[in-house]
Amino acid sequence: MAVESLATEMDTAVRVVHLASSLCVKVQEKLRLPSSTNGGHVKSKDDDSPVTVADWGVQAIVSWVLAEVFGGENLSIVAEEDTESLSKAESLGLLGAVSNAVNEALSEAPRYNLPKPDKPLGSTEILKAIGRCSSVGGPKGRHWVLDPVDGTLGFVRGDQYAVALALIENGKVLLGVLGCPNYPVKKECLSNGCNQTVTTKSAAGSVLKGCVMYAKRGSGQAWMQPLIAGGIPESATLLKVSSVDDPALATVCEPVERANSNHLFTAGLANSMGVRKQPMRVYSMVKYAAIARGDAEVFMKFAQSSYKEKIWDHAAGVVIVEEAGGVVTDAGGRNLDFSKGVYLEGLDRGIIACSGQVLHEKIIGAVYASWESSSL
């Protein structure tokens, strides 16, 4: 498929991620109110990871907008959340909070040049929109892939998270959009927070944090727009990966959570390559954003053997990094396979994303050398 023919898809995806990010900013502000114990806005899933009003709200908005623009009949959306716990009687209050967040956001949709409903959506319509995202993807056809709030733990803690939307056709990622509402202007604030306030603007009017990154497969370009309240900015900045190819000078990103990632192996690997800097521990797909923007050079994730990587945790980030000039493969140097359904099947040990081919080859070599002595 020609890159140019994705104009409507790209435009809609970028606009709806801006809109979804604005919903997240408002929900996160409520979560951080000192008087609130989160007001019942957080629920736990079976795997104990939290789900918030923002997760369901973003999924409902993206699903509804995509159905309005592209028609709901043959629309395939693969997304993280389902409606099971939200449909239960004891979740009535939570469903009400989701409905309020969705309708408040959709009322502002025209400011993002997106359609809005004639009247506020009822609970049934919102559950239908969330439930529409039940596709399992696969090797054939066109599938939108959504992680409504990637890094929910970071979101709940007031830290980094991302809204991630990608379009896959016949197993290939065609475009990706990452909304990073807390992504700081200053690189050093990524891992230590820098006491960032909730507001996205300073007194002087310059944006302190928040952006939307996006890229189309084969364009050789990745772009970043600032996140501004109530609309789409007129300009975008071209993203370019870092030119650092010496491991001693590289900044390595790794997940904050230890549950599904082997920090010990990553640390040993970084040490064997001569990495001198402390790892930058960042929640969510913001790690891909950091590489695309040149704020870090390497992201390595080696999951515990029982953990399976899901496509919505990587699709948008991978295409953005690659189009910004970076390289993303599994630890055997093979491209990630998005054609097998919900999971990244056949993954060789882990995922390596980095700023360039030279650094990538050094890492792959170090993986092979370190693997023999590893207990993984």
Image (spheres, grey):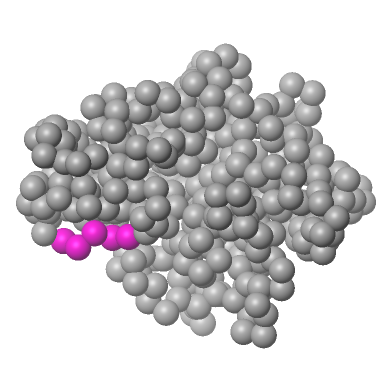
- Number of numbered callouts drawn: 0
Residue drawn at x 69%, y 42% as measured from the top left = 82
144 or 11, which lies in front? 144
Please indicate whether residue 4 sits to the left or right of residue 276 in the image.
right
Residue 144: x %, y % from top left: 61, 31
The correct choice, above or below, for 5 with respect to 353 in the image is: above
Q: Residue furthest bottom?
A: 35
Q: Image height check: is 4 above or below 366?
A: above
Q: Position of residue 278 (x, y in %)?
A: 19, 63
The vertical placement of 257 against 262, above or below, is below
Classified by dominant secondary structure, the portion drawn in magenta counts as loop
Residue 318 in which image quadrant: top left
**Residue 129 location, quadrant:** top right
Q: Is residue 65 magenta?
A: no
Residue 293 visible in image: no
Region of the chain picked out in magenta, as a range: 277-282
Extreme right residue here?
119
